[in-house]
Image: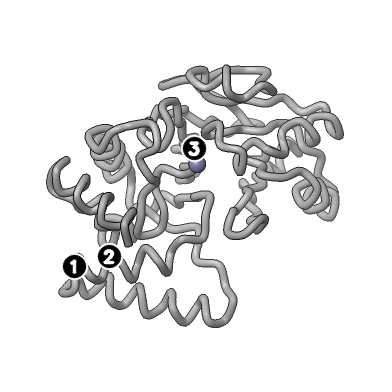
């Protein structure tokens, strides 16, 4: 069994600590910072063996160097962004595999938020680490890519099993949900989810991870019927 620990850092980032009991291995996904991650691992008696980066933004790689200095871990990230992440030991792209113990993650290229953004999909464990591509009821901003690329990403993600647990990197759920309700006011599943998220946030609880099934029902970017509609929704959210 894999265990996933959520580490909230900075304003609204989540760093994910992934631990395989059988092998004793531990992976950190997108360490924005080092110290809280090292503390979270140490508190559990775990040693960090690897870092997996989804993209080059500072709030995803900022802890790389210090965690490597403390642990000697191996850092894997997107080949297309190796020039922007100075700390990579191994570069990967679409279809490559990375491992934690006997568990295999397949790398998916999901460009749009950044040009080389990748996701790590552990199909056997029904887990995907998606970085800033898909959020709970949202998607990443199109900083380096196009709406057509994001539309293609959404279609690929929507085709994963509904019970796939989606670990994204930010707590943007409430803002995304309120915006989405303006687009799909008659979506009952969406209205129910937003109400649940409002209550959870009022209690100070995290609303991530999410699942592919939940997103298929309530994510207006995954539910966009064509590129033009996704582009319009993304532009409207950017301006909101
Ligand atoms: Zn980002």
Q: Residue at x 61, y 43 (%)?
A: 59
Q: Position of residue 52 (x, y in %)?
A: 61, 33
- Which numbered dot is residue 184? 1
- Which numbered dot is residue 180? 2
Q: Position of residue 181 (x, y in %)?
A: 25, 71
Q: Position of residue 78 (x, y in %)?
A: 52, 24
Left-right relation of 52 to 149: right
Position above or below: 42 against 104 = below
In the rendered image, the quadrant that contains the C terminus is bottom left
- Which numbered dot is residue 70? none
**Mark 2 crowd level (few <14, some 14–19, many ≥20, 10 Å Cα):** many
Position above or below: 189 against 77 = below
Front residue (pair 75, 11): 11
Pair 1/3: label in front = 1
Give the CA separation, mark 1 to mark 2: 6 Å
Residue 196 seen in render:
yes
Q: Residue at x 35, y 73 (%)?
A: 193
Q: Residue at x 18, y 67 (%)?
A: 184
Left-right relation of 173 to 223: right
The part of the image, by quadrant, that contains residue 186 is: bottom left
Ligand 1 neighbours mark 1 (CB distance < 8 Å): no
**Mark 1 crowd level (few <14, some 14–19, many ≥20, 10 Å Cα):** some
User: Circle 1 sits in a helix, a strand or a loop, which is it?
Assistant: loop
User: Circle 2 sits in a helix, a strand or a loop, which is it?
Assistant: helix
Residue carrying label 3:
122
In the rendered structure, which disc, 3 or 2, sits on the residue that comes first in sequence? 3
Front residue (pair 182, 239): 239
């Amino acid at each position: 069994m894999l265990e996933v620990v959520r580490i909230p850092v900075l304003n609204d980032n989540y760093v994910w600590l992934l631990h395989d009991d059988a092998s004793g291995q531990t992976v950190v996904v997108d360490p924005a910072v080092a110290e809280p991650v090292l503390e979270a691992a140490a508190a559990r008696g775990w040693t960090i063996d690897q870092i997996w980066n989804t993209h080059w933004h500072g709030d995803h790689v900022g802890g790389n160097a210090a965690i490597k200095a403390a642990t000697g871990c191996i850092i894997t990230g997107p080949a297309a962004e190796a020039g922007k992440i100075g700390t990579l030991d191994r570069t990967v792209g679409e279809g490559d595999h990375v491992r934690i113990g006997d568990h295999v993650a397949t790398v998916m290229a999901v460009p749009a938020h950044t040009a080389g953004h990748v996701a790590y999909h552990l199909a056997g464990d029904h887990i995907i680490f998606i970085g800033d591509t898909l959020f709970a009821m949202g998607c990443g901003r199109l900083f380096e890519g196009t709406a057509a690329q994001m539309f293609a990403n959404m279609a690929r993600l929507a085709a994963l099993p509904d019970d796939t647990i989606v670990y994204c990197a930010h707590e943007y759920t409430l803002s995304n949900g309120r915006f989405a309700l303006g687009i799909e006011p008659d979506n009952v599943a969406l209205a129910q989810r937003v109400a649940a998220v409002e209550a959870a946030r009022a209690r100070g609880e995290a609303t991530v991870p999410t699942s592919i099934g939940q997103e298929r029902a309530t994510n207006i970017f995954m539910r966009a019927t064509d590129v033009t509609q996704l582009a319009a929704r993304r532009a409207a959210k950017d301006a909101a």
